[in-house]
């Protein structure tokens, strides 16, 4: 598929995510989902949680970028700066799948020639795509959305730990060759 076609597909798929993101604002009777939890915290609490979450997303994206930078250019499936699309709402809900897949595929490609990754059995595809999917489910404004949000957070932390382990393995390998 051509890059322009893929981008158009991502944009089109982002439309339902955007609707899911704003729909609860138009129907205050809906309970659950991420907005349900945010309502429980009130305005100040919600703003603090949102700001804290964005700070964590920044550090996660920075770790993803660093991993992609440490992978040889020939093994990279995407530019390291592409991870910053995680901040582009609602596009990020779809783009996150591609970011995770690009990082996992880059690490898998790098593992073919870099013994630093030889001990890894997987490259984060399952936990990464899992948190992306659960993040979409979290937009459902009911108990299923709330459970999806919790699952997304657990899988996101699991994936982030993997990314940090892979990044540290690449750093140690680089330091050992100096």
Image: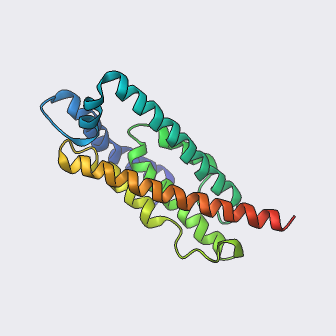
x and y, in percent, of residue 106 in the image: 60, 64
* Residue found at x 25% / y 51%: 147
Q: Residue furthest left?
A: 29
Q: Is residue 97 left or right of residue 163?
A: left
x and y, in percent, of residue 134 in the image: 32, 54
* Residue found at x 76% / y 67%: 173
* Residue 2 seen in the figure: no
* Residue found at x 31% / y 48%: 149
Quadrant of residue 130 within the rendered picture: bottom left
Quadrant of residue 27 within the rendered picture: top left
* Residue found at x 42% / y 28%: 48
x and y, in percent, of residue 38 in the image: 29, 33
Q: Is residue 108 left or right of residue 2?
A: right
Q: Is residue 164 left or right of residue 156?
A: right
* Image colouring: rainbow
x and y, in percent, of residue 61 in the image: 56, 46
* Residue 148 seen in the figure: yes
Q: Quadrant of the C terminus?
A: bottom right
Quadrant of residue 171 within the rendered picture: bottom right
Give the vertical position of 57 relative to 167 (above or below). Answer: above
Nearest to the observer: residue 94 or residue 175 = 175
């Amino acid at each position: 598929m051509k890059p322009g076609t893929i981008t158009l597909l991502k944009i089109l798929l982002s439309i339902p995510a955007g609707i899911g993101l704003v729909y609860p604002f138009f129907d205050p009777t809906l309970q659950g989902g991420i907005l349900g939890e945010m309502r429980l915290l009130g305005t100040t609490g919600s703003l603090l949680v949102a700001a804290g979450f964005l700070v964590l997303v920044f550090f996660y994206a920075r770790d993803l970028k660093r991993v992609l930078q440490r992978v040889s250019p020939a093994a990279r499936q995407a530019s390291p700066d592409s991870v910053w699309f995680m901040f582009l709402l609602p596009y990020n809900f779809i783009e996150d799948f591609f970011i995770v897949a690009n990082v996992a595929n880059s690490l898998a490609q790098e593992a073919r020639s870099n013994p630093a990754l030889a001990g890894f059995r997987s490259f984060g595809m399952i936990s990464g795509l899992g948190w992306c999917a659960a993040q979409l489910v979290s937009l459902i404004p009911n108990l299923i959305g709330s459970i999806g949000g919790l699952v997304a957070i657990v899988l996101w932390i699991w994936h982030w730990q993997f990314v940090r382990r892979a990044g540290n393995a690449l750093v140690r390998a680089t330091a050992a060759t100096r």
